[in-house]
Structure formats: C-alpha cells, structure tokens
Amino acid sequence: MPKPSPETRGGASPLKLDEFLCFAVYSAGHAFNRLYRPLLDRLGLTYPQYLAMVVLWEGDDRTVGELGERLGLESSTLTPLLKRLEGMGLVSRARDTRDERVVRIRLTEAGRALEAPACAVPGELLAASGLDLEKLARIRSELTELNAALASAEAAAATA
C-alpha cells in the first residue's frame, strides 16, 4: 500500500471531484438520460435508437458503416440496435446490390412517420434546461472542440 503524500494526510487531497471537467460531462450525460427517458418512452425508443433514427431522418438509405461513423459506434454495437429497429418496423436492412458485404439501412413508412412526434423532443429538452439557444450552441461547440482534441490525443497516444 502506498504511503500517503503530505498533501493527502488529514484528508486534504489536491484532487477535487467538483473541479473535474470529465465528471461535469459525465454528470450532465446522466441528467440528459433522465430527461430523455420519458420523452423517448413515448416514441418507443431508447436513446441510441433515437440517435440512429435522427441520422436516418437527416438522410435516408445509409450503410451500417456510415451510421457507425456518424454515431461513433462499432458495427458490433450498431448491428443489434438496427436489428431491434427493424423488428419494430422502423427500418429495413438489405445487402447492397453492388457489394453484398455492405448492409444498407432505410426508413420504413412507420420510421418516417415517427419523425414528426420526435421533432418535439429537442424543444422539450431546451425548455427543461432553462438555457437559451445561444448558450446551448456555445456549450455544444465547445464540447465538440474538446471531443476533437481528445480524439487527436487518443490517436497520438495510439501511435506512440
């Protein structure tokens, strides 16, 4: 067992959970999930399913690879999710006619029809946040910038 450092003796650790950016992001993620759950329950979707549907509503007829890249998910995670969406009648999966290794995902009529009620979700979350659009856009932009920096650091560490 390591000896306590002078800074940690007597409970005065230099580490403060409330000062960790990663904990603030983690906690915010959980808060989002708690707010999303009842809204998405009305749609019959989980949060990952909702995100996949949003990508398809942005542009239908995507490959599993395109969806995975857009969502940051591996095929092994995405495939079961897509199978569930297919079982719910929201999407269809079919092999690409030019390359049978590629699976294409298309919205069904039921999947397209779900977009209209799903459009209410972002507004309800905005209202629940108590923040204005400008502040939320700034936070999103900063988090996107942070994500890119962390991805770059991860790639650099992987090649070192």
Image: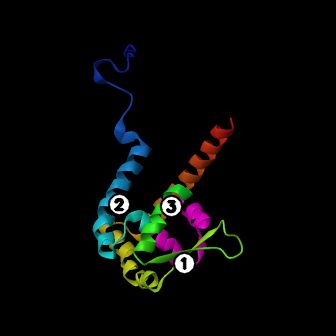
Q: Residue furthest right?
A: 98
Name the amino acid, label 3.
Leu
Mark pair 1, 2: CA separation: 28 Å
Name the amino acid, label 2.
Phe
Residue found 68% across the figure and 76% down from its top: 97
Q: What's the magenta region?
A: 50-73
Looking at the picture, how far across and down is residue 87, in whole percent? Answer: 42, 73
Q: Is residue 91 left or right of residue 150?
A: left
- Seen in the picture, residue 114 relative to 26 is either above or below; the reply is below
- Seen in the picture, residue 61 relative to 35 is either above or below; the reply is below
For disc 3, the marked residue is: 78
For disc 1, the marked residue is: 106
Mark pair 1, 3: CA separation: 15 Å
Q: Is residue 92 left or right of residue 2?
A: right
Residue found 50% across the figure and 55% down from its top: 143
Q: Is the residue marked by circle 2 packed among few (<14), some (14-19), or many (20+) residues within 10 Å?
A: some
For disc 2, the marked residue is: 32
Q: Quadrant of residue 30?
A: bottom left
Looking at the picture, how far across and down is residue 40, in whole percent? Answer: 33, 70
Circles 3 and 2: CB distance less than 8 Å?
no
